[in-house]
Image (cartoon, rainbow, N blue to C red):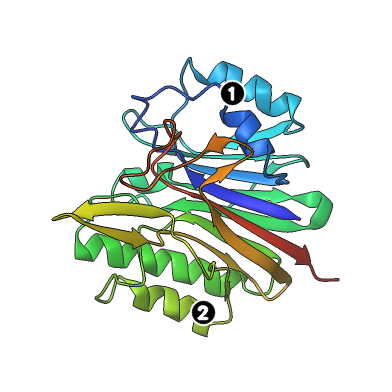
Amino acid sequence: MKILTWNINHRIGKKKIPIEMADALASLSPDIIVLTEYVQGPSHDRFLNDLKSNGFSYRRLSEFKEQQNRIFIASRMLLKDGDIKAPTDIIEAVRCNALHVTIPQIDLNILGLRMPLPMNAVQKKSWWDWVTDVAERNQGHPFIYLGDFNTDISTKGPNGWRQITKLKENGWNHALPKDGASWWMRRNGVIFANKLDHAFFSKKLSVRNAEYITESSGYIFVKKPGELKPKAMSDHAVLLVEFDVKP
């Protein structure tokens, strides 16, 4: 099976969905799609219809709050609402940037996430405490965490890469691509590549391959600073992971 996550850089609804986005995602042949920074709006009608035409008949959307990005999950298989809810006492955006669904056909749990920014150190710790607590309670189930964690290997401090290391030490398989990155920034003329989008799989699942994808079949998901390519659909690459559910 294939699952992907992609930050579509919707900027709290200020951007329109590119008309080719559904076909671009379908070109990667995923079974499950998890989008972050998604905001429902008029430009999404064609996108949703095109997704359905490509076989993604089942969809779920995280909680709605004005001026907040959300999580969108689409699947070729029946989706049901999960019972895991993000806490309400960190910042308002946390609840909108988390979505738990289940796929009964294969007994799979999926938690789509985005670490909302800005948050101070105390708020980030509370967010990570919740993430690691849910991980600990669900490591015995077929379970996938994925999305934009806004955390790169260079992110220092107690709320940075140490937290991802903790998830790995607790038995979660970090499906980190060997090559590439998911987001780039230019600072003082220097381009920095960052791996901000991640996926974690419980022991009940087996990861075959993981890769960051910048373009596919002529569709440009993202382009690095300075690249002479047609306009990209987002500022993040797609993270695509192929996996199996263990018997």
110 up-or-down from 32: above or below: below
Measured as percent of width and height from the top left, residue 39 is found at: 44, 30
Measured as percent of width and height from the top left, residue 194 is found at: 36, 61
**Outermost residue toward the top in this view:** 42
Q: Could you tell whether 196 is left or right of 217 in the image?
A: left
Amino acid type, callout 2: Lys
- Report the front residue among 101 and 57: 57
Residue at 68 percent across and 39 percent down: it is 27
Q: Earlier in the sequence, mark 1 or mark 2?
A: 1
Measured as percent of width and height from the top left, residue 18 is found at: 50, 24
Q: Could you tell whether 90 is left or right of 50 in the image?
A: left
Q: CA distance from mark 1 to mark 2?
A: 36 Å
Circle 1 Cα neighbour tier, 10 Å, few/some/many (<14 / 14–19 / ≥20): some
- Pick the quarter of the image with the N terminus: bottom right
Q: Which residue is mark 2?
A: 168
| Mark 2 residue element | helix
- Pick the quarter of the image with the C terminus: bottom right
Circle 2 Cα neighbour tier, 10 Å, few/some/many (<14 / 14–19 / ≥20): some
In the image, which disc is placed on residue 47? 1
Residue 111 figure quarter: bottom right
Residue 195 figure quarter: bottom left
- Report the front residue among 187 and 114: 187
| Mark 1 residue element | helix
**Outermost residue toward the left in this view:** 188
Amino acid type, callout 1: Phe
Q: Could you tell whether 222 is left or right of 178 in the image?
A: left
Residue 246 figure quarter: bottom right
Residue at 62 percent across and 38 percent down: it is 25
